[in-house]
Image (tube, rainbow, N blue to C red):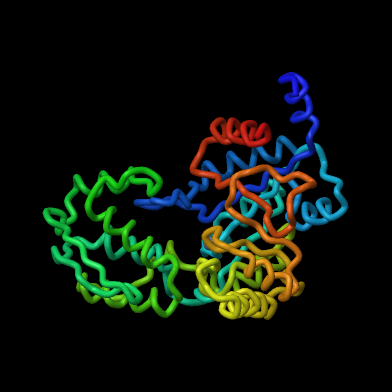
Amino acid sequence: MKKWLWKLKKRLTHQAVVLMYHRIGTTDTDPWELAVSPQNFEQQLQLLARMGITTSANSLVRQMEQKKLPRRSVVVTFDDGYADNFTTALPLLQKWQIPATIFVTTQNIGRQKEFWWDELERIVVQTPVLPQQLSMPVGERPFSFNLKEETSLTAALQQKHRAWVATSDAPTLRTQLYLRLWEQLSPLTDPEQQQALTDLRSWAGIAEEARPAYCCMSTDQLKALATAEGITIGGHTITHPALGHHPLEQQQQEILGGKKLLEEVTPYPITLFAYPSGNYNDHSIQALKQSGFKAAFTTEHAPVSKKTEPFLISRYQVNNWSAEQFEKYLTYWFRQ
Ligand SMILES: [Zn+2]
């Protein structure tokens, strides 16, 4: 096809861009770039409000079913259910009248408990003094690591940790240890992950503790969020497993169990889902269909068109960007 013709075709394609957020707040370290500052989030919402093309995930799914997508639209989603979604994001979403779907993992709702990846960071990266040698089983595999000169958390190490992102090379041994443990823990079941965290805490000589900024919503907050104007709650399992690593039966329990728990607090059925860590296989889709879900969102980077499969709706993660940076990314995504 001629280049200009191809460009014209691209421009005429009706597309939606689905955005993925996790946390609105500031954190000391953020290897997965999950936190957007309230200032930047508001700037991003202001831009979206000015563009006037935001729509809800439910409308998008309906438009996909009818094969009638508007030329451009943007959908806002959040994953996991951190408390700041209610305390910080909700007032800003309402101020700028932007609809959003919040995919909630149920296990930590109303509990003083961090997700395993956050607690792993607290133990390995934030503990002031750690023993030099770690040797323990992780799941069924032996694991060992030597921290060498990084047993004490120096100011120099802390500075490196603040700039650390997990997608580039680990800048310190502590961050290397974090990533190696993250990879080992990721495919495991929740009891195996919790056992490993218990072992790690006793190795580090620290108690279980949940930093308030890392906690999930309370049940009352979730209830209020679920009925807030413009907000839809979606499923994100009970314990956030990487679904594709688990048998169908376990996936079914996580998917349907999470849906039922959410439906105890939402006045409407839960029909939308986001794959935890973007991980899924054919069994996940089968379990979702059997559980009465209508659509599911991945973490694959692509715009949505009328050809997109409803159980494979792709999304783009939004990082802690200013309005200018965010606008550049939006323009780029719509051209994909
Ligand atoms: Zn998640």
Provide residue 266's location: percent of width, then percent of height: 70, 74
Q: Residue at x 71, y 45 (%)?
A: 304
Q: Between residues 175 and 220, which one lies in front from this camera angle?
A: 175
Instruction: Please tell me in which quadrant of the rendered image residue 58 appears.
Output: bottom right
Question: The N terminus lies in which quarter of the figure?
Answer: top right
Question: The C terminus lies in which quarter of the figure?
Answer: top right
Q: Residue at x 63, y 36 (%)?
A: 333
- How many marks on residues? 0
Residue 76 seen in the current view: yes
User: Residue 54 vs residue 255: left or right?
Assistant: right
Q: Residue at x 62, y 57 (%)?
A: 90
Residue 87 seen in the current view: no
Q: Residue at x 83, y 56 (%)?
A: 62
Instruction: Please tell me in which quadrant of the rendered image residue 169 appears.
Output: top left
Provide residue 138's location: percent of width, then percent of height: 32, 72
Provide residue 22's location: percent of width, then percent of height: 53, 55
Whether 305 is drawn above or below 225: the answer is above
Whether 169 is drawn above or below 203: the answer is above
Instruction: Please tell me in which quadrant of the rendered image residue 276 appears.
Output: bottom right
User: Residue 211 vs residue 245: left or right?
Assistant: left
